[in-house]
Each structure stands twice: as structure tokens, then as C-alpha cells.
Amino acid sequence: MLRSALLATVSVVILATGSTASAQTSPASANGTTLGEIVVTANRREQKLQDVGISVAAISGVQLRDKGLSSSTDLLQLTPGIYASGSLAGQSQQFTIRGVTQSDFNDAIEAPVAVYVDDIYMTAPQGQTMALFDVARVEILKGPQGTLFGRNATGGLVNTLVVEPELHRYGGYLDANYGRFNEAKVEGAVNLPLGENAAVRLSGYYGHIDNYWKNRYPAGVAPGSALNFGPAGPSPCCQDEGGNSTYAGRLQIKWEPTDRLRIRLTGQAAEQDLSTAPYTVAGTIGTFDAQGRLIQSDRVSPTETRLGIGPDGGNYTNFGVIPFAGIGSPSGQRVPGATWFGYVPLDPDHVELSSDYALRRLNVAQGAMGAIHLDYDLGGAQLTSITGYQRFKKQFLMDGDGSPNNLFLFGTKADTRAVSQEVRLSGKSADLRWQAGVYYLDIDAHTTQGLLGPKGSLYSMLFGLAATGVDGVDVLRLKTQSGSLFGQVEYDFAPKWTIILGGRLIREHQDYTFSSFAALNTDDYAVDDQVALFPLAPPYANKRTKTLWAGKAQLEYRPQEHLLIYAGVNRSVKGGSYNAPAPDGSPPLSPSQMAYGPETLINYEGGFKYGTSRFSVNGSAFYYDYRDYQAFLFENASGFVQNVNSKVYGLEGEIGAQLTDDLRMTLAGSYTHAEIKNFEVAPGVERTVRPTYAPRVQVNADLTYVAPTEIYGGRVTFDAQANYASGFYHNLRNFNSDWFSGRTLLNLNANWSQGPTGLRLGVYAENLLDKRYGVIGFDSTALFGGNIESFGKPRTFGGRIGYTF
């Protein structure tokens, strides 16, 4: 019924607020009565949102502030068709748009949804920590955007535009939030003129939340089950998890020496300090066919004692780990409802877990960026140059089995550096707008990742090193140099008609080295790779150069004022990359499997936009011919990417209306049907599957009421927001245990504001219904008889205060 209703609805949207040009702008017009004229830069030039023939969502800095959003992936609650995948229980996340995602957790790879901060492409997912503070606007472009944007925008683009320094104006703001779990957020900025033609802007952000997942170690362990497989495990042990602290700052200097020249220098840095990743466990059981192939997995019932289900429905014990499964339980059987090793998982509804490897403050990510933005008016054309440098470092560790049993860990550390240079030239006449440019990107990514065996772990025991521990690591380095030429023209060839043609030619070179070995464990709370003991897989090295291209052809028709109809074809590409399977006992990949090729997405899309000052309705339909999709399949404790073909189609709709002078409503919905045919879920077993982290149905609704009269000299606004996403799979095999059910989130906000300047007060409640919903999962049925899973944040509530001057 819901699907039929969505397919029949043409809808949105999103922006019912006033000007989005500055983070200090009032969230509504003076009397809160009209829909605003939203300006976006989706075509690399300023245009009204309703005049852009792209499916775009634009969220102002004011909206982010008033809704209390400070994480990039919080944006998925504001617009349908966008979701998030990731790893490390959400401590590392990336976007999914219209079913296009890449859930590989290798830090050297790049995602198919490009993230830009202040016109700089973020090469590492952790770079998003520098995004959502002192923001002017966030633009989410759905569908391929490979023509005008420099890198890997196969699935779409998330572009964060910061508030720039303002000449001749002294001002700033300070906002502070405090809520449940001692969650605190402080954000502020100050703008200082420097003479007549220069200004500086300094902005910063601090966020903290306590560890709200309570660790009940060793709760859930059946009597007699082994906690360690040798000497006692790592110490300290078993602290609460889920907390983090984030520090970020940005400095900008703008100088306009002449009327034609503008130079802006930026520098920003951020650090995240987090607990070990807060994973919980769900017991699972696999079904095996007569050839011993795992063809299905299910969540276990409280009475289940089989280790696996054989082809005759009986207990299946014909796999290598079974000799260890008998520890603490009858040989060849499991404790009822437990994992193979005797852990009966705690109920996540109580926000409790039981883990032997858990520290409140262990994982850390650091990032720094610098850029030079130059704009010069040549008279008949505009020259833009953006030079960027970025570096990101991280070390994250987690309990790989998420249980009190000391089985194994997963750890990763990465050091990524990148330099980019873009030069654009643009111009226009009465009927013609054009852009052309060059783009260069140089990435050097060093990554060490793998399965780690601290003292007393099962993993270290298998190597005969339980007394000291051992780290099984992959050490890899991927250097990428990519250069491209691009251009786009928009020509009004007849009254009311516009044609858009664009293209990008890309030359990409990659240099990859890989080694896998057992390393001496010197620190149970670090990824050790300094002293190699013995190899675990053959080394691999490869160099290659590819020529790729992207293109766009679109027709736009404006039959009357306020109405745009568009249809077009957009081709985008993402370069190939390399696998780095963790040493989990699986057979090594062949050299032909280590490298995977580029992916190509051809989007056939049409839509319309209609908007006035009090009403807007937008709709679009799309069909993706997705060739050589880089599909990540997780098995045991690792996975690999392979190229497969996929088909995606769907509808999106949005409605926005000023129902009365005081009441504003927005409603948006999306339906995305994505599938991969003849996908090999087991050797020789093929099925039609759905891509991961791709809900088919999403609905967003927002109702905002602005009190008609001032209260104590300020305006009061009430906002209710509901977000629904249907269920999805977290593993490409689409086994039953890989399914997360849909969820509905409800958020409430009430704010009092004196206006664009002055005092602000507010209260909020997020996830009001306290839903416990799955976010990220990994199927380890064949490794320890369970899945590790993470869940969204529980209900939070609190207050905020701010002042703008």
C-alpha cells in the first residue's frame, strides 16, 4: 500500500526557510509566512534551486543549527534517497544515494558518492568531521555528477559550503547545546575586518557525548565457556563504549586587492577521540547444502543448539572451526541461543553489551586541510583556481566478535595525503553559459589493517602464540594521480528551451603494493606492523593507467513562469582500485581478483519543478544502467570487491507549502528499486540480490509553526520532523540474518529567537520514540556463529542557547 502510494505521488519540498546565504540568517522571513528563494551552486554557478534541472536538496546552516545536526550523516534524516553505510559501528561512515554505495572498509579506497568541503574533495571518509560547523549551506546532488565535479561522483555528491569572511563587518555567533548522556556541543565564529579590503574569520566546534553503551562483561557467557584461550586477555578491560569527543577549527582570510580579484586562504583541522567501536552480537546459524556451501543464514532462536543446518536439516559440523566450538559446551553443539563459543547476546534494547575489548577512549582520527581560493574577473570571463592540500591519520580498533570471548580484533591505521588543483574558466552571454577547466588530484594512501590477536585470544592460539599475541596485518600503499579536462555549455536555442552538453576526459594512474604477514604483538591496544614474523599471503604489486570519460546531455523546457521540465542522459565513472583481504583463513585472492576495474553509471532521468513563494512541487524519475558496479562482498571477517552489473530505477517527489501565514509543511518521498542479477552468493550458487544499505522506500515530513506574535521580544518556532526508511540488507548475499528492519524516527524542536542577531533559546528531543534500529552489520556466521551489529543513538533530549552579534 505504501509503495503504491509513493509511486503515485509526485512530491516536495525541502526548503521552506528564508535566505541560506549565511549561517546567521534568520530561519524564516520576518513574519514566517513565505517560502524562500533558495540559491545553490549545483552547476558551479549560482542559480535558484527551482531553476536547476538536477534533483538537489539544499539545507541551510540555520536549519542545521535549529535542528541540532552536527554530523554529516545526520543529513539523511532531512531528504529521502540518501542513506549511510560504514564500518566500525558507525565511527567510519559514508553516504549511499539512490542505492549507490561502497561498503568496503579499506581506508585506501574512495567512495562513489563524493564529499566536498569548501570546494575540496575529501579523499578519506574521516574528513567529513571538518564539515558541519559554521556552514552556509549543504547541497546534496542525487545521481551522477562527473562532468563538473572533479572526482568520483558516480552516485552523487554532498557539497558543504562554509560561511566566508565578510568585508566591512564585525560580528559572530556562539551556540551551545547540552543534553542526555552529557552530550555537549559548542560552536562559534568571529568575523573581523582588516582594513577596507580584507577580513578574517575564525570558527570552531567542540562536541562530546559520554559512553552510553553499558558494558556488562562477562554477562551472557554460559557457565564453563572459555573467556580466554591462554593467559589473561588484554588489560585494562571492559569499559563502557559509544562516546566520543570532537575538536575542529577553521581559519579563513579573504583579501580583495582590486574590484576584479578575490583571494581566500583557508586552514582547518579536526580531531576525533572515540571509544572502541560499540558492536553488539546477534547469534546466527548457517544452512549448508550437500556440497558444504553456505547458502543461507538465520538468526537463532532461544532454543537453537545446532552449530549449522545440514542439507537434511540436521546438525552440521563439517567445517574447520568446530573443534573449538566444543569448548565450554557439549562437543558439536552450541549453548541454546548462543554463538558457537557460548555467548548468549544481551538485548540491545537495554543499550547494553558484553565485550572483553572495550576502552572509553582509544580510537583517534586527525585531519588537516589548507587551500587557496582565487577568483579573477577577466571582463568577458571568470577565472577560478582552487589549490588544496589535506592529510588524514587514524587508528581504530574494535572487538571483532563483539562478545566477552577473547576471539579476535579488527584494527586499522591509515595515513592519507592528497594535493589537488582545479582551474575553471566560465562566461556567459544572453543565450549561452559555458565552463571549461582542468583538474588534478594526487593521493598517497598508506594503510595497515587486519585481524589482531591480543594475549590469550583464539586467533593467537591458532598460531601457537597465545602467551604474547600476534597481529595478522595487511600493509598496503596506493598512489593515485588523476588529471582531467572538462567543459559544459548551456544554450537557450529557442524561447523557453535550453540544451546542456558537457563532458570530462580523465587520465588516471595507480601504483599499488600489498603484503600480508603475521607481526609481533607489542601492544594489545595498537595495530602492530613493525616486526614481521612470517607471511600470510603472497605479496602483490601492480601499476596501471586508464583513460575514462564522463558526459552529459540534457534538454530543459520552461513553458511558463515557475515551471521547469527536464530530461537527460548523464554518464559518470569511478576509477578501479584494489582489494586487501584481511587474513581470516580464507584462501588468498588470485592476482586477477586483487585488482578490480572502473565502474560506469549511465543515468536516464526526467523531472519537473514548479515553485512559487508559497508552494512548490518537484518530481523526478530515473533509470540507472550500472555497469561493472564495484560490489563489496563480506565473508568470514573480511571481504573483497568485484565488478558486477546492476540495474536501478526509482521515483522521487517533494511538496512544500505555506499552509497558513504561520504554518509551513514539507513532504518528500522516494522509491528506489536496485538489484543485481546472477550474483554468486556461494561458489556456483547465483541469485538476484539487492545492494547493501539501500532502503527501497523513504519518507520525510516536516511541520513548522511560527507563533504569530512575539513573546518577550522574540519569535517562537515549533518544528516536528518524521523520517521513515524501509528495511535493507547489510551484506550482498542477502541472507535472512543480514536484514535490518525499517524504522521511523521522530524529532521535535522548539526555538525562541530575537531575530538575525541577538539571543536564541531552544529545547529538543531526538528519536523521541526511542527506536533501536540497525545501522551497520557484518555477517560472521561461518566464523563464530553470529553477526556483529551497531545501532542508532537512543532517545536524546536537551536544550540550547545561542547569541549572534
Image (cartoon, grey):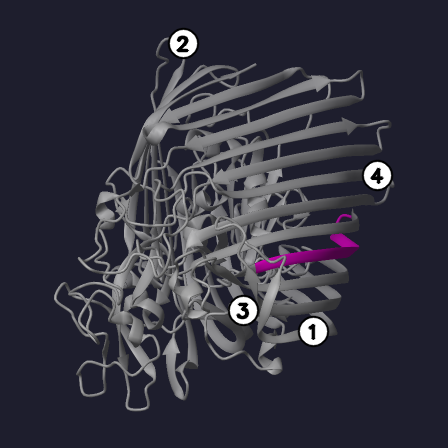
Q: Residue at x 73, y 21 (%)?
A: 167
Q: Earlier in the sequence, mark 2 or mark 3?
A: 3
Left or right of 759 on screen, residue 170? right
Mark 4, residue position: 377
Q: Secondary structure at mark 2?
A: loop
Nearer to us of marks 2 and 1 is 1
Q: Quadrant of the N terminus?
A: bottom left
Q: Inspect the image, locate mark 1, and give the three-letter code of the amino acid beneath it.
A: Ala
| Range shown magenta | 428-448
In-front residue for pair 675/232 = 232
Q: Do the numbered discs 4 and 1 sit on residues whose CB atoms are within 8 Å?
A: no
Identity, as a three-letter code, of the amino acid under mark 2: Gly
The quarter holding residue 32 reads top left
Q: Quadrant of the C terminus?
A: top right
Relative to 95, 223 lies left or right? left
As rendered, which of 664 and 24 lies closer to the eye? 24
Judge depth for marks 4 and 1 and give the one in front: 1
Distance of label 2 from label 1 (alpha carbons) = 68 Å
**Circle 3 — which element?**
strand
Cα–Cα span, label 2 and label 3: 52 Å
